[in-house]
Amino acid sequence: MKLDKKERLSLVNQFLILEKLYPEEADYYAQHRQAISEGYELHYEWIYESLWEGLSKDECRRVIDILDMYRAIYFSSRKCTNKMVKEHYWLKFPGFDGNEESSYMSYCRYFIMDLKRYDELRYGQEIPDFNSHMPTLNKYGAMFAVWEELGKSHNLGADKILSILEAR
C-alpha cells in the first residue's frame, strides 16, 4: 500500500489523537503512528488487520432469512410433542463455521447480541458464540428452500419441521 505524505500526515495526527483519547491503548497507537511517520510500508497493512471484509446486503439478508427460518422452527417446535423433532440435531440454530464462515458468524452475533434481535435463538445462553465448528451455509440453503416452498410459515407442524430439518 502506498501513502503520499499528506495521507501519512493525516494518519499520524489521527493516531496522536487516539493515543490521547485512549491512554490504555496508547502504545498500540504509537507503534502504528511511528510506522506511518517513518514510512515503513510493510507495516501499513497492520493498521487494517482488525477490519473485517464485511458482508454485502445480500449476504446480510441471507443471515436474516436463516434467523427468521430458525425463529419459525423454534416457536413451532415449542408446541410440538414429536420426539423426532425434539431430538433432531438441527433443531437448535448452531450458528456458522468460525473458520470458513466467520463473516457470517460475526454478523449473526452482531445482529442477535448487539442489536438484540432473535433473542430466542440464544437458547438461554448469556453469551452464545454461534460457532457451529462446521460449514453450514449449504445446509441452511437447502433448509431455506424447503421453508420457502412451505410459504415461509411460522406455524409449522411436526411433518413440516422435519422436512425443513432433513433438507439436503
Image: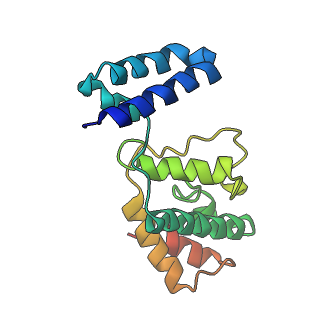
Whether residue 125 is situated above or below residue 26 in the rendered picture: below
Where the N terminus falls, by quadrant? Answer: top left
Q: Give how far across and how far down residue 20 sits, in percent.
A: 61, 19
Q: Give how far across and how far down residue 115 sits, in percent.
A: 68, 53
Q: Residue at 43% of width from left, 62% of height from top?
A: 56
Q: Which residue lies furthest to the front in this view?
A: 6
**Can see residue 64?**
yes
Classify residue 27 as left or right of residue 101: right
Residue 73 lies in quadrant: bottom right
Q: Give how far across and how far down residue 111 sits, in percent.
A: 61, 54
Where the C terminus falls, by quadrant? Answer: bottom left
Classify residue 99 as left or right of residue 72: left
**Can see residue 96?**
no
Whether residue 14 is situated above or below residue 79 in the rendered picture: above
Whether residue 9 is situated above or below residue 59 in the rendered picture: above
Q: How many labels does the image show?
A: 0
Front position in the image: 88 or 41? 41
Q: Give how far across and how far down residue 90 sits, in percent.
A: 52, 58
Colouring of the image: rainbow
Front position in the image: 29 or 153? 29
Q: Residue at 44% of width from left, 33% of height from top?
A: 10
Q: Residue at 47% of width from left, 78% of height from top?
A: 146
